């Protein structure tokens, strides 16, 4: 009599891992499909910036006064901002319109960036699209406003303080606005620290404990970045930039704690 083989016991089910849900949603894309997707996202982002530019040019007069009037007020009595090239003032208006157009289109541009990287994320990570866009927009605009109202005026006063009876400070509008844009975009990028930490914490690259343990190194890096971003050598301007960065780092620790990657507990 033949003996039938004893069936082996089925393997125990694996514990559910939240990172494995819907991993293959949307399928895999080829390299050319990725390039086409990138092209479409770039076109949509540029169209949004173009629309913002047109809207900004409609209100370019108040925008010009908003940027330049406070700077002219800091100059010595009777001081004026000047331009020496025929096209300099016209190009300044165009650059202002481009900067404001970028800020108006920022939510759309950030959404296109998220939509491009979303296919490589897990389904539960895609739910952070709205927080990503909102936080990025708010912090970037907050950084540019902080530059406009606090850091740049302090630096401008430092530059204007060297005017004497024999030396008159009469800056050209083109380098002034270039410096203004550099500061605004630099602080806008610096203020994105909580958003970056949110993303890194969600994918498990950083933890609140890691950020707390390396606080002293972070503060050192913050002061180095402040010295690089701020073209003015005075300590006041650099401190005005470093102080909010330290506050943002502390806030980023809280963000990392809220959005950190949760490891599922497996019962025995």
Image (cartoon, grey):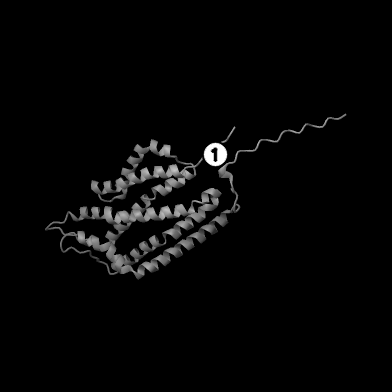
| Residue 65 visible here | yes
Residue 176 x %, y %: 27, 59
Nearest to the observer: residue 60 or residue 39: 60
Q: Give the residue at x 33% y 64%.
A: 96
Q: Give the residue at x 35% y 65%.
A: 97
Query: Against 7, is 144 above or below?
Result: below
Q: Is residue 108 left or right of residue 60?
A: right
Residue 11 x %, y %: 68, 35
Residue assigned mark 1: 264
Q: Give the residue at x 26% y 63%.
A: 68
Residue 27 x %, y %: 61, 52
Q: Quadrant of the N terminus?
A: top right
Query: Against 70, is 219 above or below?
Result: above
In the displayed orientation, state which residue is furthest to the left.
165
Q: Give the residue at x 65% y 38%.
A: 13
| Residue 90 visible here | no
Give the class, few, some or many, for how many residues have Cα within 10 Å of label 1's Cα (few <14, many ≥20).
Answer: few
Q: Please state the total of marks drawn on the protein image.
A: 1
Q: Quadrant of the C terminus?
A: top right
Residue 253 x %, y %: 40, 42
The local secondary structure at tag 1 comes to loop
In the displayed orientation, state which residue is furthest to the front.
267
Q: Is residue 257 left or right of residue 267?
A: left
In the displayed orientation, state which residue is furthest to the right.
1
């Amino acid at each position: 009599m033949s003996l039938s083989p004893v069936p082996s016991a089925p393997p125990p089910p694996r514990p559910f891992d939240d990172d494995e849900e819907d991993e293959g949603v949307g399928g895999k894309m080829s390299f050319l499909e990725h390039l086409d997707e990138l092209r479409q996202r770039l076109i949509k982002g540029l169209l949004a910036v173009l629309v913002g530019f047109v809207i900004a040019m409609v209100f370019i007069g108040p925008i010009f006064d908003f940027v330049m009037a406070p700077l002219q007020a800091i100059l010595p009595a009777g001081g004026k901002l000047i331009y020496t090239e025929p096209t300099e003032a016209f190009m300044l208006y165009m650059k202002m319109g481009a900067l404001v157009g970028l800020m108006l289109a920022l939510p759309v541009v950030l959404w296109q960036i998220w939509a491009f990287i979303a296919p490589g994320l897990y389904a539960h990570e895609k739910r952070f699209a709205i927080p990503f866009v909102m936080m990025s927009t708010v912090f970037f605009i907050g950084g540019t406003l902080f530059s406009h109202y606090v850091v740049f005026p302090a630096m401008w006063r430092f530059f204007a303080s060297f005017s004497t009876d024999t030396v008159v400070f009469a800056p050209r509008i083109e380098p002034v606005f270039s410096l203004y844009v550099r500061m605004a975009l630099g602080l806008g990028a610096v203020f994105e620290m909580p958003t970056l930490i949110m993303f890194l914490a969600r994918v498990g690259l950083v933890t609140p404990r890691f950020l707390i343990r390396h606080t002293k190194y972070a503060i050192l890096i913050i002061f180095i970045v402040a010295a690089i971003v701020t073209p003015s050598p005075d300590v006041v301007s650099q401190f005005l930039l470093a102080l909010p960065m330290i506050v943002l780092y502390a806030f980023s620790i809280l963000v990392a704690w809220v959005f950190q990657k949760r490891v599922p507990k497996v019962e025995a």
